[in-house]
Image (cartoon, rainbow, N blue to C red):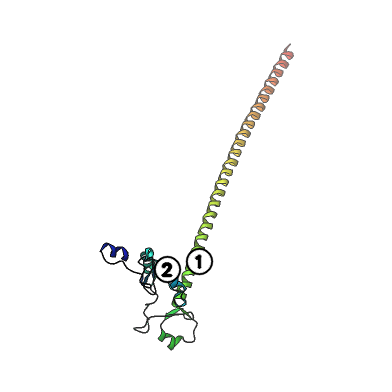
Amino acid sequence: MALSNSLQSGQAPMLCQMCEESNEIKWKCLQCDFLLCTKCQQLHQKVKSTDQHIIIDIKDITTYQQEVNDQPDIINIPCSVHNGQNCCQFCKTCEEIICSLCFLQAHNTHDMIGLAKEYELTLEAVNNFHTEVEENILQIEKGLSKLDIRKTSEESLYESEKQKILNRERTLKNEIEMHTHNLLMKLDHRREFLRNQYKMKKIDQRS
């Protein structure tokens, strides 16, 4: 960006801040705050004293800066006990952040860890917990889905059995009605037969 601005304004092209020869600026060392050409970037990473420096493509500077801004400031956390002191450690024994004076006065025998490391571990624990919660939610959703399927299946089975019972009821009713009708017909025939027999007997007696 600085290179393009210098060209547009008519200024001399910006040179690599290490070799001061190449104007093909493509990299920036965040620790040294140097703009580098590709050759110097490679050399910079080979030097033992700077091999751990963070070097990024100049096209990614804005994105990187945004990511840095989004991270919490764990360096400038004021101590709640000592005015003017920033917290620098986390006391695992007391589970609180402390400054150097706190350490000397009350925590020098406690189990300590650096703030950055504690933040990293806490963030990892939170992410793991978040993953575990999502997995549990997924399992619950699967379980509920199975319950819904089972409920639907049981409802279908219930309706099927209910229909069978009702059909059987109608069949039995029809059979009972038919049987009752037959019995009544036989009874009527029996009564008519007996009446006829009685009449015939009376006629015979008169004659």
In front of the other: 13 or 153: 13
Q: Judge left or right: residue 141 versus residue 101.
A: right
Between residue 166 and residue 27, name the one nearer to us.
27
Q: Is residue 77 above or below residue 125?
A: below
Q: Which mark is residue 128?
A: 1
Q: Foreground mark, 1 or 2? A: 2
Front position in the image: 144 or 19: 19
Q: Locate residue 93, reporting x and y percent.
A: 49, 81
Secondary structure state at the residue bearing disc 2? helix
Q: Does 78 appear above or below 64?
A: below
Instruction: Identify the element where label 1 is drawn.
Output: helix
Q: Is residue 56 left or right of residue 197?
A: left
User: Residue at horizontal 46%, vertical 85%?
Assistant: 107
Q: Tell how many labels.
A: 2
Label of residue 60 in the image = none
Q: Nearer the viewer, residue 1 or 195?
A: 1
Query: Furthest-top residue in view?
Result: 207
Tag 2: amino acid: Lys
Residue at 71 percent across and 13 percent down: it is 203
Q: Quadrant of the N terminus?
A: bottom left
Question: In the displayed structure, would residue 129 be above or below residue 184?
Answer: below
Which residue is disc 2 drawn over?
39
Q: Residue flagged by tag 1: what amino acid is it?
A: Asn
Dot 1: within a 10 Å radius of its alpha carbon, few (fewer than 14), some, or many (20 or more) residues?
few
Circle nearer the N terminus (1, 2):
2
Query: Residue 134 at x, y = what percent?
Result: 49, 60
Position of the C terminus, as image quadrant, is top right
